[in-house]
Amino acid sequence: MLKSTLEQWRMLKAVVDHGGFSQAAEAVHKSQSTVHHAVHKLEELLGVKLLQVNGRKAELTEAGEMMLRRASYVLQEARKLEVIANNLSKGVESRLKIAVDEAFPQCHVYHALNEVSQRYPHTRVEIYETILSGAHELISSGKVDIGISGFLLSVGSNEQLCAAPFVALAHPAHPLHQLGTLSFEDLKSYRQIVVRDSSATQSRDSGWLGAEQRWTVSNLRTSIDLISKGFGFAWLPQSEAQQAIDAGLLKPLTLEHGAVRTENFYLNIKDSDQLGPAGKTFVDQLKASVEASTSE
């Protein structure tokens, strides 16, 4: 029979996270005496000193650090169980949060969203449009349920969706088109349009970034608009730039090598067991759309 309870461990973690008993009591909406009693009872049941008070700050003992580290995992799993149970009891999730890299072929996302809309019209869908490691950050932190990213998760599931081509492009009247076959050295003297990483905690680069002149923007659509107006060149995802290419606003640059590069995109799910019917439908339809396009 277990001596300790999840609630006692939750109280201990709150004291550590918030730096003291009074702060923890406020955070968990309990009285200070209730929090203090829970921690004291836990120490008594285990026969181990878990906390020590230095001044006004409560800190873990060495034994407390080791035990809370293990208990934190149990608390996290317990929260996951409650989320799963909540989804099962409701039948369909009320909200679905998805992070999508803007460079991923959006037609597949729209196909999957259409199916979700048809089957689960009352599920609220929140789409987070990201660049580079932005989607990876959101799924890693648990802020979204599903991520479509160019990076692999260190935990959870990763499934490669597709390899998307990026094409070096400029407006047809751009001076670079008058130079014939280009080298990277030729590009250095002209303005490159770059889209910044949307991650709040890290900034990653992708592809060639050797131009002496550089304009940095926050989203892909702005990049396409600027290049379509002759402000510079860039490697753009072909799927998103194709309409401008067909309209004669963009033209592929002729390079000795590297005119086209590919980027892999992955389906990231931190915990697939937590996905409800709407989330699973989105995943299934997304993969089906990608598979259908690659088999054409």
Image: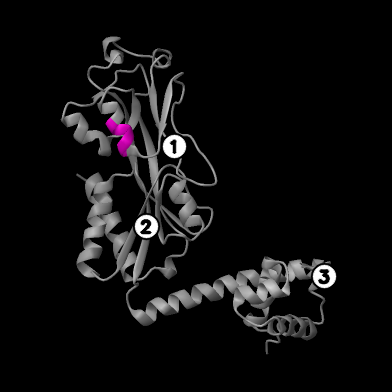
Tell me the magenta residue range.
221-225
Magenta span: predominant SS is: helix
Residue sitting at x 75%, y 85%: 41
Q: Is residue 37 above or below residue 57?
A: below
Q: From the viewer's side, name the closer residue of 105 and 200.
A: 200
**Mark 1 → mark 2, Cα distance in angstroms:** 20 Å
On the image, numbered disc 3 is attached to which residue? 53
Q: Quadrant of residue 206?
A: top left
- Residue 146 is inside the magenta segment: no
Q: Quadrant of residue 284?
A: bottom left
Q: From the viewer's side, name the closer residue of 53 and 143.
A: 53
On the image, numbered disc 2 is attached to which residue? 98
Q: From the viewer's side, name the closer residue of 199 and 290.
A: 199
Residue sitting at x 48%, y 49%: 152
From the image, state whether disc 3 or disc 2 is nearer to you. 3
What is the x, y in percent for residue 281?
Answer: 29, 65
Element under label 2? strand
Dot placed on the residue nearer the N-terminal end, 3 or 2:
3
Q: Are marks 1 and 3 in contact (CB under 8 Å)?
A: no
On the image, numbered disc 1 is attached to which residue? 196
Say which amino acid is labelled 2.
Ile
Residue sitting at x 39%, y 38%: 263
Q: Classify residue 289 as left or right of residue 189.
A: left
Within 10 Å of disc 1 (Cα), the crowding (few <14, some 14-19, many 20+) is many
Within 10 Å of disc 2 (Cα), the crowding (few <14, some 14-19, many 20+) is many
What is the x, y in percent for residue 269?
Answer: 43, 59
What colour scheme was applied to this rendering of the protein? one colour
**Mark 3 → mark 2, Cα distance in angstroms:** 43 Å
Say which amino acid is labelled 3.
Val
